Image: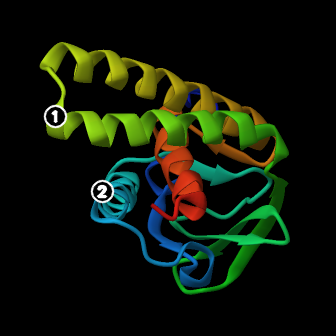
Amino acid sequence: MAEGQDPDKDPHAASRRLCAVTLDGASIGRSNIDVEHERAVAIYDLIEENTFAPLGDAAPGPYCLAISLAEGRLVLDVTRKDGAPVVQHLLSLSPLRRVVRDYFLVCESYYSAIRTASPSQIEAIDMGRRGLHNEGSELLRERLKDKIALDFGTARRLFTLVCALHWKG
């Protein structure tokens, strides 16, 4: 590092991000309108604001991410904007199964409640939903810590997309 250069300043920080995210259509299939909306919002939000950098990749991004399921594993296929491969990570879904299952149950209650429940009931269910979402996000971030640098907001949106691969509505 050059003398006088701030070690906390990453000259490539703005490029350590995702510019495109796709979900494998064969992995997700069609679902109800609430789930489709969650997927679209998560992808939009993820692209708009994220911190994402495969560890060990010396060249700056931005990166494209394709998410799919294969043989019970989560597949994160990272490429450059021009399509050049960067890395592919396969993660066991076993550590995420309980929190994903619980998250689905609470989400189903939430979607049902927003149509008929009182505001205080909806708020209570939503608090539980957000708590499980945070738990799943931290777990995903922990699983990726030696593979991909990402912030908590990026982990939250990725967790939503991991759930989208399982949720058939």
**Could you say which quadrant of the image residue 41 lies in?**
bottom left
Q: Position of residue 4 (x, y in %)?
A: 56, 26
Q: Residue 87 falls in which quadrant of the image?
A: bottom right
> Which residue sits at x=63%, y=28%?
138
Determine the residue positioned at 43% across, 51% down.
14
Left or right of 27, for residue 74: right
Residue under the image location 59 percent in, 54 percent down:
162
Q: How is the image coloured?
A: rainbow
Is 156 situated above or below 66? above
Q: Amino acid at mark 2?
A: Asp
Q: Which residue is mark 2?
A: 34
The foreground one among 111 and 24 is 111
Which residue matches tag 1? 116
- Quadrant of the rendering where the C terminus is positioned: bottom left
Q: Which mark is residue 154?
A: none
Q: CA distance from mark 2 to mark 1?
A: 16 Å
The local crowd at label 2, few if under 14, some if 14 to 19, many if 20 or more residues have their Cα within 10 Å, is few
